[in-house]
């Protein structure tokens, strides 16, 4: 629904403030006649719950692109019964004066509901879904069949991945696509598999993402993560379109989404949460994948400030081909749960002068995995 007539300039300030993802309640002003309002939550909420203790006047009206509802004899009746995230609404009040209304938002406080093993920032991966990123890249120890997250966001294992095998007592962090350990019906599905004869032998056979009947091929779905809640079905890998949404589509308070950087002497990419404000830390060349990592040099001490504000860091952990490891410290390659064709899968990649969510790789290559925990 589109309207050309502006009701009042002051409503713009109210609507901008209502976008804070940490808000539990938002106070809005309902003017006599028409008022623009927005619903800033992350989940739909019924109209009665949203307005809490506020009692509308007989004949009040709410319009949206979904239709019209009218307040008649104590009930909202009409074309819809819920407010939806990201949409605007027009409220017609029959009261002769302006009233303040406490608008209830169905959204968790990110500081109070952060999952074990997660960074406390909320990231939109679609118009209706937010997630928490894990505290570090996924790591695996074959000798004990144990999964964990890296202790620090900048940690990666580099040449240790040369030792990949079913009995290796060290840790690895570069995996073939879909190698969660669940038998998906393909030749190679173990996290220690390193055969590089054909990408078609890895992950879900043929065409299809690591979802639905093949969701267990996703590392985070199938495996308990020892320092990430230690239960199955808690984490998952982003789809290609979700990586794209994080980098290029979502709205943030600051208007910026990512920046290339060198954190604690490690090259990589910083992802900024939805509620990031520029006064938290001044980052140069934000949302520009074509710049070098050196545009932002951040010490471990300064990184604490960014991490406490919900920032995520993806280190340039390189790749593995068979038992050969390369590009670590220079390039980052992060799997998505999306297939490209029967031999290739989609991934996020970044290099000293580029960053892209639109690339694909042979499934047999070892790549980094950074999982997320969806907000319920």
Image (tube, rainbow, N blue to C red):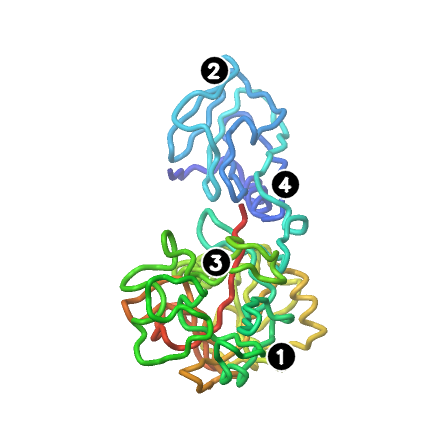
**Residue at position x 51%, y 39% in the image:** 38
**In front of the other: label 2 or label 4?**
4
Label 3 sits on a secondary structure element that is helix
Residue under the point 43% across and 57% down: 216
Check contact, mark 1 vs mark 2: CB within 8 A.
no
Disc number placed over residue 263 in the picture, else none: none
Q: Secondary structure at mark 1?
A: strand
Q: Position of residue 134 (x, y in %)?
A: 57, 62
Which mark is drawn over residue 24? Answer: 4
Q: CA distance from mark 4 to mark 1?
A: 35 Å
Nearer-N-terminus badge (3/1): 3
- Badge 4 marks a residue whose secondary structure is loop
Q: Left or right of 211: which side holds 269? A: right
| Residue 25 placement: quadrant | top right
In which quadrant will I find the N terminus? top left
Residue sitting nearer the eye, 139 or 77: 139
Kindly report which numbered mark, 3 or 1, lies closer to the viewer in this rendering.
3
| Coordinates of residue 64 in the picture (x, y in percent) | 41, 33
Tell me if I can see residue 252 in this picture: no
Task: Give the residue at mark 1.
Answer: 297
Q: Characterize the local packing of mark 1: few (<14), some (14-19) or many (20 or more) Cα atoms within 10 angstroms.
A: some
The CA span between labels 1 and 2 is 60 Å
In front: mark 4 or mark 3?
3
Residue at the image position 61 percent from the left and 24 percent from the top: 54
Q: For residue 222, which numbered disc appears in the image? A: 3
**Which residue has dot 2 on it?**
72
């Amino acid at each position: 629904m589109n309207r050309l007539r502006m009701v009042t300039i002051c409503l713009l300030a109210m609507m901008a403030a209502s976008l804070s993802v940490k808000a539990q309640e938002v106070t809005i002003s309902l003017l006599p006649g028409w008022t623009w309002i927005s619903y800033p939550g992350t989940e739909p909420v019924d109209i009665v719950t949203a307005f809490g203790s506020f009692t509308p006047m007989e004949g009040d009206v709410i319009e949206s692109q979904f239709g019209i509802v009218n307040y008649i004899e104590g009930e909202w009746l009409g074309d819809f019964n819920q407010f939806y995230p990201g949409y605007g609404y027009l409220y017609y009040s029959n009261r002769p004066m302006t009233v303040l209304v406490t608008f209830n938002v169905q959204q968790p406080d990110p500081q109070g509901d952060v999952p074990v093993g997660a960074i406390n920032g909320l990231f939109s991966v679609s118009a209706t879904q937010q997630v928490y990123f894990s505290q570090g890249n996924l790591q695996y120890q074959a000798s004990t069949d144990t999964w964990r997250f890296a202790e620090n966001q900048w940690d990666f294992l580099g040449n240790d991945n040369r030792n990949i095998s079913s009995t290796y007592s060290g840790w690895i962090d570069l995996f073939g696509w879909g190698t969660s350990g669940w038998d998906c019906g393909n030749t190679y599905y173990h996290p220690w598999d390193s055969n590089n004869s054909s990408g078609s032998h890895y992950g879900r056979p043929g065409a299809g993402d690591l979802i639905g009947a093949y969701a267990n091929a996703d590392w985070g779905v199938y495996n308990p993560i020892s320092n990430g809640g230690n239960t199955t079905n808690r984490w998952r890998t982003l789809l290609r379109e979700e990586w794209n949404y994080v980098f290029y589509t979502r709205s943030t308070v600051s208007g910026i989404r990512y920046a290339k950087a060198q954190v604690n002497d490690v090259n990589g990419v910083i992802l900024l949460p939805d509620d990031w404000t520029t006064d938290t830390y001044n980052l140069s060349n934000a949302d520009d994948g074509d710049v070098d990592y050196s545009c932002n040099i951040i010490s471990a001490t300064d990184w604490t400030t960014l991490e406490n504000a919900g920032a995520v860091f993806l280190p340039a952990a390189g790749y593995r081909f068979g038992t050969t490891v390369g590009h670590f410290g220079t390039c980052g390659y992060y799997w998505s749960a999306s297939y490209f064709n029967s031999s290739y899968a989609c991934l996020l990649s970044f290099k000293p002068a580029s960053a892209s969510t639109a690339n694909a790789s042979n499934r047999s290559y070892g790549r980094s995995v950074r999982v997320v925990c969806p907000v319920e």
